[in-house]
């Protein structure tokens, strides 16, 4: 496994202590120019960028990747350890990663490239600390996107009741059994076949990449914290609000790369975002699914590199 990953540009990981949690991270081309952080999607890890980091390292970028807390080989904290996991927490993780790991080596602004959940985290970062971010490439951008949601009034007491019910539900819901069945019934394989348009790209390495974290005894605790965190987020952590905030300044150029055959987050959502926010650029990759960067890495790398190369920065 390690030999294969080194050939694909991802080196054996370093480990970073973030607020008492162990976080694996890697860098290829550390001595190069602009830093890039690759942020993986739900259920994945830094290893999902196996076909991307070396390309950018050869283009003179310092290509960083890390496991978001609760995923991959990072620690999997439960509610007693962290209470909740959401894109706000992961954004703070990325912020500290930039300050503690990248900045001492490289003072330049950081480029963020994210897949799915990683794209939402990248967007959150761009709003939370935009001065540190040069651009965001989101492929695709998940989350419910209803421009009318911000206009609706929700009684605070009702919201508190709903959030309490969600927390109670996931506290007692037997996620341990669910994860056991997911593994035994081959649900991971089914999910990957739904995510990937080109089924021949689903190899044993990809399956292991997603499957192994699920087998860890702490996986259910971490998943419970994610379910509660993502379900009870405040509006300032939701995509429609974050895009509105970013639109106010337009200081962080934003590129969407969307698979034309994405079944998880259909293309119409990408078109809707680009239509509502004209400063956002949308690139569509036909005959590709939810993970364009892994399914069509040469196309993804080319689009991303040309976008970064052509940026007009001050």
Image (cartoon, grey):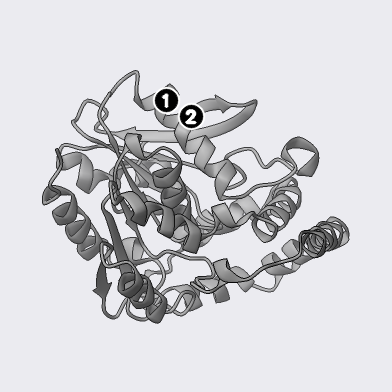
Looking at the image, do the residues carrying marks 2 and 1 touch, with CB atoms under 8 Å apart?
Answer: yes
Crowd class of label 2 (few under 14; some 14 to 19; many from 20; radius 10 Å): some
Q: Is residue 92 left or right of residue 272?
A: right
The x, y position of residue 230, in whole percent, is 64, 57
What SS does tag 2 mark? helix
Relative side of 35 to 37, left or right? left
The picture places residue 60, in percent across and down from the top left corner, at 16, 37
Residue 282: image location, x then y, percent: 26, 69
Alpha carbon of mark 2 to alpha carbon of mark 1: how far?
A: 5 Å
Q: Which residue is mark 1?
A: 99
Locate residue 284: give its quadrant: bottom left
Residue 96 image label: 2
The residue at the point 35 percent across, 56 percent down is 247
Q: Residue at x 80, y 39 (%)?
A: 80
Q: Is residue 12 visible?
A: no
In the rendered image, the vertical position of residue 249 relative to residue 11, given as above or below: below
For residue 271, the mark is none
- Residue 247 in view: yes
Determine which quarter of the picture holds residue 82.
top right
Q: Nearer the viewer, residue 13 or 304?
A: 304
Task: Tell me the SS state at disc 1.
Answer: helix
The correct choice, above or below, for 28 with respect to 271 in the image is: above
């Amino acid at each position: 496994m390690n030999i294969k990953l080194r050939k694909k540009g991802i080196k054996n990981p370093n480990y970073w202590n973030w607020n008492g949690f162990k976080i694996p991270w890697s860098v290829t081309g550390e001595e190069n120019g602009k830093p890039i952080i690759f942020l993986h999607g739900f259920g994945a890890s830094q290893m999902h960028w196996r076909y991307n980091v070396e390309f950018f390292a050869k283009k003179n970028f310092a290509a960083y990747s890390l496991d978001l807390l609760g995923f991959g080989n990072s620690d999997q904290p439960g509610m007693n350890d962290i209470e909740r996991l959401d894109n706000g927490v992961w954004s703070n993780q990325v912020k500290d990663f930039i300050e503690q790991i990248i900045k001492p080596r490289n003072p330049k602004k950081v480029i963020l490239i994210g897949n799915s959940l990683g794209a939402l985290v990248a967007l959150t970062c761009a709003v939370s600390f935009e001065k540190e971010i040069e651009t965001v490439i989101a492929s695709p951008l998940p989350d419910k996107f209803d421009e009318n949601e911000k206009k609706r009034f929700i009684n605070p007491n009702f919201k508190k009741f709903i959030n309490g019910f969600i927390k109670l539900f996931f506290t007692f819901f037997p996620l341990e059994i669910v994860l056991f069945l997911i593994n035994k019934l081959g649900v991971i394989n089914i999910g990957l076949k739904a995510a990937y348009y080109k089924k021949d790209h689903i190899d044993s390495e990809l399956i292991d990449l997603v499957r192994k974290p699920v087998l860890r005894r702490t996986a259910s605790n971490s998943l419970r914290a994610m379910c509660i965190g993502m379900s009870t987020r405040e509006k300032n952590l939701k995509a429609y609000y974050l895009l509105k905030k970013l639109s106010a300044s337009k200081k962080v150029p934003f590129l969407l790369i969307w698979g034309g055959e994405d079944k998880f987050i259909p293309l119409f959502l990408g078109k809707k975002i680009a239509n509502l926010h004209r400063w956002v650029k949308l690139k569509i990759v036909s005959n590709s699914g939810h993970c364009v960067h892994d399914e069509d890495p040469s196309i993804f790398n080319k689009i991303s590199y040309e976008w970064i190369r052509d940026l007009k920065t001050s």
